[in-house]
Amino acid sequence: MNPFVLLILFSSLGLGTTLTFASSHWLLAWMGLEINTLAIIPLMAQHHHPRAVEATTKYFLAQATAAAMILFAGTTNAWITGTWEMADMSNPLASTMVIIALALKIGLAPMHLWMPEVLQGLDLTTGLILSTWQKLAPLALIMQTAQSISPALLTTLGLLSTLVGGWGGLNQTQLRKIMAYSSIAHMGWMIIILQYAPQLTLLALLTYIFMTSAAFLTLKTLTTTKINTLATAWSKNPTLSATAALVLLSLAGLPPLTGFMPKWLILQELTKQDLPTIATVMALAALLGLYFCLRLCYSMTLTISPNMNNPTTPWRTSTTQTSFSLALLTTAALTLLPVTPAILVLTT
């Protein structure tokens, strides 16, 4: 793609998200979301592959439906209350419509069905943008309107997402679909704690971005999109295979890695709020995610592909991909657990 076109598209992505962040008016927020959606669509369809075009069409339909619902909810609220302000979502019908539309935007269960299919049709770089940057604007709107939304609805969405994200990833062989279900589960963790400790939602989002970015960049460097090709990765790049396995375990929330921090603090906060049953279900749902991440680690580090040559280290070309961002994100995804006390001081 032409670099000038890429510059315009990435600038529009940034503009759309910033516009939504800065808005307190529903029409402006809707405009930011639309700019965001329209900017990523050419990036998704740039390879002109039938799967990419199909994924782009599915994404466009899902996002357009959600945007129409947000506009309708904002209009309904303005009609009843006389204001377009986000802070004044006093009408229960409008606030319920808004949270359902925003849940569809970020792929929360049960509005998650487009997410694995769309991610499967994209290349890894666009998949990374879809899994991280595209979540920011809708999550900002959810955080702004959370106080006017029914707590039971938020809890239901959070629980369903963690369970669906865990169950859905168990039987997958495609790495992008596994990453999609992991994303759904992480969104559930963020949503369930939002009404009690919004700062923990932000912390979970930040660690999620670190871990997911590191995972996608690792898969891109290894040029692998299926479990069975992971088995050949160790002979080509042993160091990267080792760190990839650790990043996946961090994504699953295993101590002593970074991914354990948000899960630990969220479970602690749920227990403080006298919700031990929900905390227990969330912890058990996290085990499902741990299982499919362990499955990937097993394929990557403990198996030998049956179609390999006898030499353990095949001839390899030096990669032209930059590794600085990967090294930085991998370090963040693995080593931030010891700074938990400092983060607690900052967030309380």
Image (cartoon, rainbow, N blue to C red):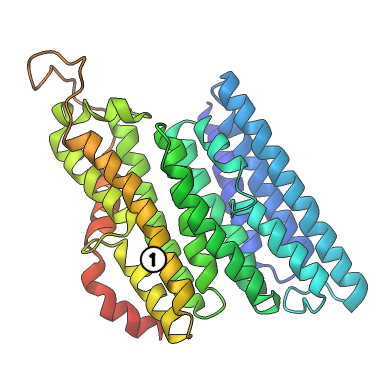
Q: Is residue 271 above or below residue 120?
A: below
Q: Is residue 320 above or below residue 264?
A: above
Location of the C terminus by quadrant is bottom left
Q: How many marks?
A: 1
Residue, x 55% and y 64% (percent of image)? 158
Relative side of 38 to 73, left or right: left
Q: Is residue 27 above or below residue 144?
A: above
Q: Residues within 10 Å of mark 1 (few under 14, many from 20)?
A: some
Relative side of 186 to 94, left or right: left
* Image x and y of residue 8, in percent: 59, 40
Residue, x 53% and y 29% (percent of image)? 121
Residue on which the image places disc 1: 283
Foreground: 266 or 76?
266
The amino acid pointed to by label 1 is: Ala
Residue, x 64% and y 66% (percent of image)? 141
Q: Quadrant of residue 191?
A: bottom right
Q: Quadrant of residue 19?
A: bottom right
Foreground: 160 or 135?
160
